[in-house]
Amino acid sequence: MKIIQVKTILTCPNQNYLFVKILTDSGIYGVGDASLNGREKAVADLIDTYLSPLLTGRDPEQIEDFWQLVYRGSYWRGGNIIMSALCGIDMALWDILGKSAGKPLYALLGGKVRSKVLCYSHVLGGTQEEKIAQAAEYVQKHGLKVIRLRAGLPAANGTFGVTQSQGGPKTEPWNPEQEIEGTVEYFIRIREAVGKQVGIIYDLHERFSPDQAVRVLRKLEGYDPFFIEDPVAPDCVGSLRYVREKTVVPLAFGELYKSRWECLPAITGRWIDFLRCDVIRVGGVTEARKIAALAETYDIKMAWHGPNDVSPITHAVNWHLNVSEYNFGIQEDGATDGLIRQVVSGGPVYQNGYLVMENRPGIGCDIDEEAAARYPFCKAYIPICRQEDDSLHNW
Ligand code: KDG
Ligand code: MG
């Protein structure tokens, strides 16, 4: 079998996504997700200009060799743009392998060790009252066992998310003292609303300094968080160690890591309980399974990043990893049931607090290219945060 064409498909069904479709001379094709929120065109250009010519004429089964060719062969290693491009291709190659073997991806990864996937969903809503009502409703209506809250002035409207502001990024305020108080108050109110049986996750989104993070986490210790996500930024490894040494709250970390090597200090130091890498950001299935194996070695559970800015293809890949990896913890399920469902078919669906998926060869998703063309790319930015003195802060 030989690769005859590599296509990039950039589409904006409410939110930009970048897909890769690899066609072979056997008629089998594979699909992958290379979406990188706010920088999609840069990834598409890398694939179209540099990577597609390297793929054409190759045997699609040489997945590891192609991964190494892109990672090491370009000399300039890693980074979000290269790794996202690599992921789109890597996923499509695994999809081709599964389809040609007539097996779902999880079977190629060693087979199922579980039948369904525990997941958590986001509480969105506007005011704190609306969010509290929404949390209780989610639990009741969808049977969710775990819910996720997020940083960003809980009492204010629309302070989190992706904007399609053509002129530039939307600016959101950041006031750490207000946020520390708001986070703790919000968490306690949600705990009271949903009871002890429901797990609560709080995403602090890398915004606090180490000392602020410790203040929040210590206040939350008595309220049984399922885990607290990204209390500090990943740039300074000592920050995470500092936080770990000062709290017993379960910690989840890693959506900004771009490689196995970046994860290593947190894994070997066992500063975290859940590793939350994003499959797209680490270069696809090939790297994801190595990362999961490393985490298993150190008794750390996987909680793959699954926001709504990755497509149902990535949610499906997450699911295949989840059912086949021994050290699975929980799966984030950012809502994927908007317009994107017109473009991508397949992927996991809810069933009473779990994610299940139909048994199909490969990843189990397909792209409707005509539907994708109906939603052309629309430049968008991730918001930024500024403090009261106007200085920029991590969003
Ligand atoms: O594009 C940025 C999002 O992927 C990120 O903000 C989502 O933090 C996130 C999460 O945990 O889902
Ligand atoms: Mg997060």
Image: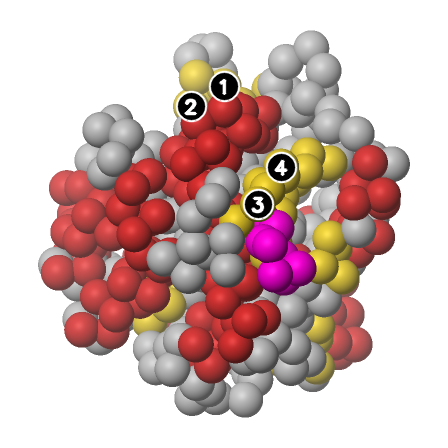
Q: Earlier in the sequence, mark 1 or mark 4?
A: 4
Q: In this picture, is 199 found above or below 26?
A: below
Image coordinates for residue 236, horizontal then vertical, percent = 20, 35
Name the residue located 30 percent from the left edge and 52 percent from the top edge. 65
Where residue 164 sits: x, y (%)?
A: 72, 25
Secondary structure of residue under mark 2: strand
Q: Residues within 10 Å of mark 4 (few under 14, many from 20)?
A: many
Q: CA distance from mark 4 to mark 2?
A: 33 Å
Q: Position of residue 104 (x, y in %)?
A: 55, 77
> Residue type at mark 1?
Arg
As drawn, the label of residue 393 is 2
Instruction: Determine whether label 2 and label 1 are within 8 Å by CB.
Output: yes
Instruction: Classify mark 3: residues with Cα within 10 Å, few (<14), some (14-19) or many (20+).
Output: some
- Mark 1 or 4: in front is 4
Magenta region: 22-29
- Spatial CA distance of label 1 from label 4 is 35 Å
Which residue lies under the disc numbered 3?
4
Disc 1: which residue: 386
Amino acid bearing label 3: Ile
In this figure, which residue is indicated by the disc labeled 4? 8
> Residue shown at 75%/45% (left/top)?
126
Sequence-wise first label, 3 or 2: 3
